[in-house]
Image: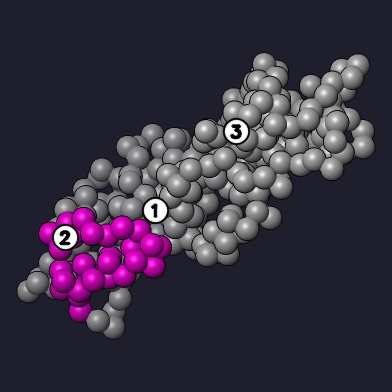
Amino acid sequence: MVRDANLLKLLRVKVIDSCLQKKKGPTIYDLHNACLIAIEKYDNSYNGIDIATIHKDIRDMISGKYGYNAPIIKTKKIYSYKNPDYTITKLPVPINNNRIKEMEEVLSFTKIHKKSFSFEKTVKEGVLPANLVSLIRYKAIDECLRDKTKKYTRHDVYLACVKALKEFDINRSSLAETNIEKDVYVMRSNKYGYNAPIVIKRKIYFYSDPNYSITNLPIPLNRHFRKRIKTTNAFLKEYQDVPLFKKLIKKYT
C-alpha cells in the first residue's frame, strides 16, 4: 500500500526530481540547496532542513514507499536517473483526500480574503488561530453589516454565511442559525482583535460605525496557519501541471 506524504515532503521530492532530469547531475549539496530555495521562496521564516533529510528523501524515492521506485544512481558523488526518461510527474501523487481537503480550505480562505490578504501586512501573529471556516463566516457577516442597501436580520446573515460556505464547497450541515449569535459575540470581543461595533436593533444587525470593517484589521492567524498557507502555495507551484492540482488552482483563483 502506497503511503500518504505530507506537502513539504512532496515539495522536496518534486525539486529533487527536477534536478535529476538536468544534464549536469547534482551532488547531495546541490539537491539540499535547491530544496531550501524552493521552500524559503514562500516561507523565509523556514528553519531549514539538513542533509540527512535529503538522503532520506532519495531513499524513499528509490523504494516503493510512495510508489516511485525511482531508478536513482550515484556516481562519484553525482546523482542521476539510470533511465533518463524517468520522472515522478508521470506517476500518481501520493496524497490522500484529507490533505486535498486541507488545501481546499486554505485556498478558500485566501480567495475570500484576496483583496486584503498579505502575510507581511495583514496577518496578526501571537493570537489564537481562528478556524479558517469561521473566518469565512466572519467575512460574510462583515459584508452584510457593511451593506447599506439592505437591512439584515439574523436569518439573513445566516443565509449569507450558508451561501459563502457553499461557494467554497465547505460542509455547512453543522451550521445552525444560532451560530450567528456566537460569531457576533466573538467579533464584538477582542479575542481576535476585532472589537466590532455590532448593534442589534429591532432584530436588525449593523455596525454603529459605518466605516468599520474587519478587512481593515490584521487577519487572526498564528504562525502554524501562516506556514500551512505558505506550504500549500509552494506545493501547488511545483505541481501546477498535475491535472488534479491544476483544477484546484483554477477553481480558487
Depth order, front residue of 223/168? 168
Residue type, label 2? Ala
First along the sequence among labels 1 and 3 = 3
Disc 3 residue crowd, few under 14, some 14–19, many 20+, Cα 10 Å: some
Query: Which residue is tagged 1?
Result: 217
Q: Look at the image and give the residue range highlighted in magenta.
A: 151-180
Q: Percent from the top left, x then y, of residue 75? A: 89, 19
What amino acid is at disc 1?
A: Leu
Between the residue at mark 1 and the residue at mark 2, the CA separation in whole angstroms equals 27 Å
Q: Which of 83 and 18 is in front in this view?
A: 83
Badge 1 vs badge 3, beta-carbon distance below 8 Å? no
Q: Could you say where residue 129 lies in the image, as x and y percent from the top left? A: 35, 40
Read off the residue under disc 2.
Answer: 176
* Residue 44 shown in magenta: no
Q: Which residue lies furthest to the bottom in this view?
A: 149
Please name the residue shown 15% across and 69% down the image.
154
The residue tagged 3 is 66
Q: Report the front residue among 30 and 215.
A: 30
**Marks 2 & 3, CB-CB < 8 Å contact:** no
Q: From this view, report whether residue 61 is shown above or below residue 99.
A: above
